[in-house]
Image (tube, helix red, strand yellow):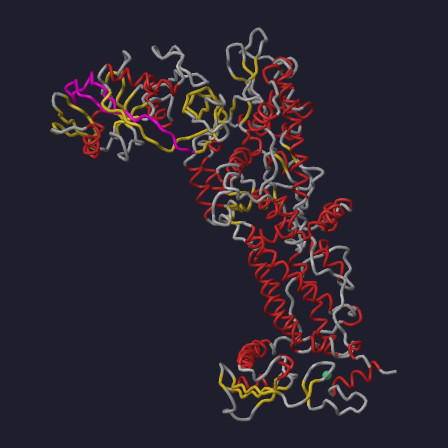
């Protein structure tokens, strides 16, 4: 007889290799054709709502690994919520306005912008943006991200723009919108004001000059003729100088150097002395800054006064403690001058070129003027020193060119009017990580009013009209009319029609006696677009609601979307638009460096998909500590693939041993399970509870670790290993065999459900092979709650201890193998002498002891002193004296007892006789 035929060897068609790059696209196509997103919503209808509101990526270019990290994290949460009792819609979005698209058209697409109208150019921008959305959408879907991809939100749609106008109108109605002249970050290279988020710092070489201003009216503090020294790295701002700021509480000195008397901060005298090469210095007077208030000095090359003012912004970090103040070119300057009733003055135009208001420099580019101005200072003797320094300087993030501060007429949202409300709301939000709260709090606390106007074409127009006398007109009526127009025609109509045709019919204003109007040509800051999504999306889509449960974005969005959304929402509703903020870090290479083409260390999501599969990328996302910066490299992905293989093989092994298991018929009740199976199911509940707890706190790495360790330690090295001697050997219906299969079945279904949000392709594939499951896909099931395994109460402590004793035995077997006492562990007979009563209790009450150690015989000695002592037992290992059974490979003295099956042990002989003999 061929005994091999009588073994119940594992059997499954579930492939060992994932072959993910080929199989995932098919599965995704299925999801789409079967409307899996809609069906998942139908399945969960009526449950509590859970909204993760998508922060819109910018519709330009291919997605990079940071996008993948972001969207996959969101998908984990949405899928998890929909499998744990919630109705969790996910509406992806895109941000579509702004300079990068204008630039892409003029640079990459060679669009001749000057040969067309603004409206025509905007049409091209729209087409381009929609094309980019299509391409990005395809790429996001390939990540396995589930959502309403056919019906996303897009900031250029009519509905969205109409909602945005309403948000603007509501803020205007509350008096939060105003127009003012103010220095803002200005990019001469793109001829536009910039948001703080559009600034990046790069090194720049600049002149560093020390200039003297002669006192003309000492106001009783000075005699006159003293020279106040200022230091600046922007000589080109000197034509706009209107004052010198001193700190009211700082000590200043009048220092006699040869025939001159100079004024500097006392704390900086030594530094100035060294820089200017002074040798004999006598301090002739010391005074507090506040004493010099309103002293007048002479501008170094114009016939006008420069007023000494007091400002808290003055420091002794560098320079002289006397600060050159040009209110048209600096924010601190602007505010200190405002206190003294001095208006912003800016003789530089939008291209960065001097106007006629700067006599002598008209027509010069600001950066070229540095040299000319410095020469002029040198000629008239007010230049004390010229050096060059390299320092960190604000640049336009798109053109990479230096920016300047320039006073221009801008529209502002007044943050100060509702700052306190925002700060209160920040406290009501949960922050992951917790430092996010302080970060946003400080950002809002220190934030100046929000400059929302941009001098560009591609964006939502600022819906303001002007009367004949230049007065801005924003009324409920005009706002509501413009909002309706945008809802019907889109915002392009603003550029297609004359102002009069954009106003409500018969509209009149005291500011326009002749009925003539003009319209604002500036557009809104794109952060206002995306920052209005709580109105444009959460309030506009029937399946969503405000506040959202979660906003989840990269940590750069504390100053971006988290901030702009909070500002507009508090302004309009008094409440934050979100309950939880989760932020993630940036993706770096394996060595912690930024990814860049020049370093050749860029990992592209599409390439990972093609080589390894999206589930590998997703498993990587789940395994990193995403709230900090994370790393990815080919080596890291290789480790992830290893971890994937471990999990996949475990699933495969479980499936293969369930081939003949029909849960409806063969499942064993908890109370009737073998102890070890009850114990393993109890361990499963611990893993399940840990996984759910971590999901609830948006921690995914511990979920993967728990499952991975359970697979590697509890299952592979124990539960799947010793059970082979039962599963393969005993008769199909043997109670011990069915008991183990019952354990395997629950472990398999539960683990697949737990991992379904993370590796949805693989989880669904495994599900298809599990016998007797009802749901058509694992994604339409609920992850079970941890349950009490009946009859596990009394045995958990016993088995926990048994597993410790088992470690001792495994150690002893390992040593015996090294000493060549035995080869395979099945050759061994072991004798155990417990070192304490508890251990004896446990060992004497575990049936089939030898099976759990995978030895052929295990006996318990009455007395100690039989072998080497370990932590809990003495162990003696010897080669078993019996013969090896041909069928089960257990060594037994019973081999040969049965005359019909002389090569089998008694157990095998009986299994074969009862089941395989006709
Ligand atoms: Zn046997």
Locate residue 223, reporting x and y percent: 14, 19
Name of the residue lying farthest toward the front: 820
Q: Is residue 801 visible?
A: no
Locate residue 889, reporting x and y percent: 69, 81
Q: Residue at x 23, y 33 (%)?
A: 249
**Residue situated in front as seen by the camera: 164 or 903:** 903
Quarter-of-image position of residue 648: bottom right
Magenta portion: prevailing SS class:
strand
**Residue situated in front as seen by the camera: 10 or 92:** 10
Q: Is residue 483 above or below residue 354?
A: below
The number of discs equals 0
- Magenta segment: 201-229
Which quadrant of the rendered structure holds the C terminus? bottom right
Queried whether the magenta region covers residue 203, the answer comes back as yes
Which quadrant of the rendered structure holds the N terminus? bottom right
Q: Residue at x 59, y 34 (%)?
A: 58
Quarter-of-image position of residue 308: top left
Locate residue 452, reporting x and y percent: 51, 27
Name of the residue lying farthest toward the right: 918
Locate residue 719, reporting x and y percent: 64, 72
Answer left or right for 292 relative to 66.
left
Q: Is residue 412 above or below residue 839?
A: above
Queried whether the magenta region covers residue 914, the answer comes back as no
Q: Residue at x 16, y 28 (%)?
A: 278
Ligand 1 picture quarter: bottom right
**Residue situated in front as seen by the camera: 414 or 100:** 100
Q: Is residue 740 visible?
A: yes
Q: Is residue 576 above or below residue 368?
A: below
């Amino acid at each position: 007889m061929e005994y091999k035929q009588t073994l119940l060897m594992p059997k499954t068609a579930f492939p060992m290799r994932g072959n993910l790059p080929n199989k995932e696209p098919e599965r995704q196509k299925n999801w789409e054709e079967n409307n899996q997103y809609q069906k998942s919503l139908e399945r969960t209808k009526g449950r509590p709502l859970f909204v993760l509101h998508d922060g819109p990526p910018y519709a330009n270019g291919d997605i990079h690994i940071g996008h993948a990290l972001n969207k996959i994290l969101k998908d984990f949460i949405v899928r998890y919520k929909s499998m744990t009792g919630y109705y969790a819609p996910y509406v992806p979005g895109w941000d579509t306005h702004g300079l990068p698209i204008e630039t892409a058209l003029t640079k990459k697409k060679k669009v001749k912008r000057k040969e067309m109208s603004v409206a025509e150019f905007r049409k091209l921008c729209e087409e381009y943006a929609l094309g980019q959305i299509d391409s990005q959408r395809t790429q996001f879907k390939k990540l396995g991200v589930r959502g309403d991809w056919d019906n996303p939100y897009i900031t250029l749609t009519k509905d969205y723009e109409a909602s945005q106008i309403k948000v603007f109108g509501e803020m205007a109605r509350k008096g939060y919108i105003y127009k003012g002249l103010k220095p803002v970050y200005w990019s001469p290279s793109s001829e536009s004001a910039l948001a703080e988020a559009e600034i990046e710092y790069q090194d720049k070489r600049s002149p560093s000059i020390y200039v003297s201003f002669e006192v003309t009216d000492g106001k009783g503090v000075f005699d006159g003729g003293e020279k106040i020294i200022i230091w600046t790295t922007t000589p080109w701002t000197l034509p706009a100088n209107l004052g010198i700021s001193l700190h009211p509480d700082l000590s200043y000195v009048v220092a006699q150097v040869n025939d001159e008397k100079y004024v500097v901060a006392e704390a900086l005298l030594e530094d100035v002395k060294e820089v200017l090469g002074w040798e004999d210095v006598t301090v002739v007077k010391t005074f507090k800054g506040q004493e010099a208030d309103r002293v007048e000095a002479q501008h170094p090359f114009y016939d006008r006064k420069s007023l000494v003012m007091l400002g808290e912004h003055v420091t002794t970090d560098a320079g002289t403690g006397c600060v050159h103040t040009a209110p048209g070119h600096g924010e601190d300057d602007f505010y200190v001058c405002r206190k003294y009733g001095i208006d912003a003055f800016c003789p530089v135009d939008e291209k960065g070129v001097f106007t006629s208001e700067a006599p002598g420099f008209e027509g010069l580019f600001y950066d070229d003027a540095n040299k000319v101005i410095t020469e002029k200072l040198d000629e008239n003797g007010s230049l004390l020193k010229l050096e060059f320094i390299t320092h960190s300087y604000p640049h336009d993030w798109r053109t990479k060119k230096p920016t300047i501060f320039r006073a221009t007429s801008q529209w502002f949202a007044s943050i100060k009017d509702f700052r306190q409300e925002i700060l209160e709301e920040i406290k009501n939000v949960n922050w992951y990580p917790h430092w996010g709260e302080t970060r946003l709090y400080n950002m809002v606390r220190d934030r100046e009013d929000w400059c929302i106007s941009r001098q560009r074409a591609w964006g939502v127009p600022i819906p303001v009209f002007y009367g004949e006398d230049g007065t801005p007109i924003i009324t409920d009526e005009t706002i509501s009319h413009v909002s309706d127009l945008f809802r019907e025609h889109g915002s392009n109509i603003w550029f297609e029609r004359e102002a009069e045709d954009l106003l409500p019919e018969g509209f009149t204003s005291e500011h326009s006696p002749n009925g003539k109007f003009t319209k604002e040509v500036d557009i809104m800051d794109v952060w206002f677009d995306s920052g209005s999504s709580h109105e444009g999306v959460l309030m506009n889509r029937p399946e969503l609601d405000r506040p959202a449960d979660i906003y989840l974005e990269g940590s750069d969005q504390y100053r971006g979307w988290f901030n702009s959304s909070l500002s507009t929402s508090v302004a309009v509703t008094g409440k934050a638009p979100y309950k939880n903020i989760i932020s993630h870090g940036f993706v770096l290479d394996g060595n912690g460096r930024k990814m860049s083409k020049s370093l050749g260390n860029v990992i592209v999501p599409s390439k990972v998909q093609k080589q390894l599969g999206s589930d590998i990328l997703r498993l990587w996302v789940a395994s990193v500590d995403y709230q900090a910066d994370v790393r990815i490299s080919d080596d890291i992905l290789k480790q992830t693939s290893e971890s994937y293989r471990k999990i996949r093989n475990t699933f495969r092994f479980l499936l293969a041993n369930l081939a003949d298991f029909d849960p409806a018929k063969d499942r064993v009740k908890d109370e009737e399970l073998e102890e070890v199976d009850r114990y393993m199911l109890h361990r499963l509940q611990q893993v399940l509870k840990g996984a759910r707890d971590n999901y609830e706190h948006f921690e995914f790495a511990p979920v993967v670790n728990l499952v991975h360790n359970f697979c590697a330690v509890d299952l592979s090295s124990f539960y799947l290993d010793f059970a082979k001697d039962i599963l393969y050997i005993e008769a199909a219906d043997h109670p011990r065999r069915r008991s183990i299969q019952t354990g395997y079945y629950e472990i398999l279904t539960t683990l697949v459900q737990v991992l379904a949000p993370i590796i949805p392709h693989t989880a669904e594939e495994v599900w298809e092979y599990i016998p007797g499951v009802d749901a058509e896909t694992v994604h339409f099931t609920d992850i079970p709650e941890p349950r009490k395994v009946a009859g596990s109460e009394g045995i958990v402590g016993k088995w926990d201890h048994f597993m410790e004793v088992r470690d001792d035995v495994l150690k002893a077997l390992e040593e015996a193998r090294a000493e060549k006492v035995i080869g395979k562990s099945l050759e061994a007979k072991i004798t155990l002498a417990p070192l304490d009563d508890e251990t004896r209790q446990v060992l004497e009450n575990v049936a089939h002891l030898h099976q759990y150690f995978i030895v052929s015989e295990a006996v318990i000695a009455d007395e100690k002193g039989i072998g080497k002592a370990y932590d809990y037992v003495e162990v003696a290992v010897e080669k078993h004296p019996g013969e090896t059974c041909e069928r089960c490979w257990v060594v037994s003295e019973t081999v040969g007892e049965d005359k019909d099956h002389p090569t089998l042990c008694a157990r095998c002989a009986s299994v074969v006789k009862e089941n395989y003999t006709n």
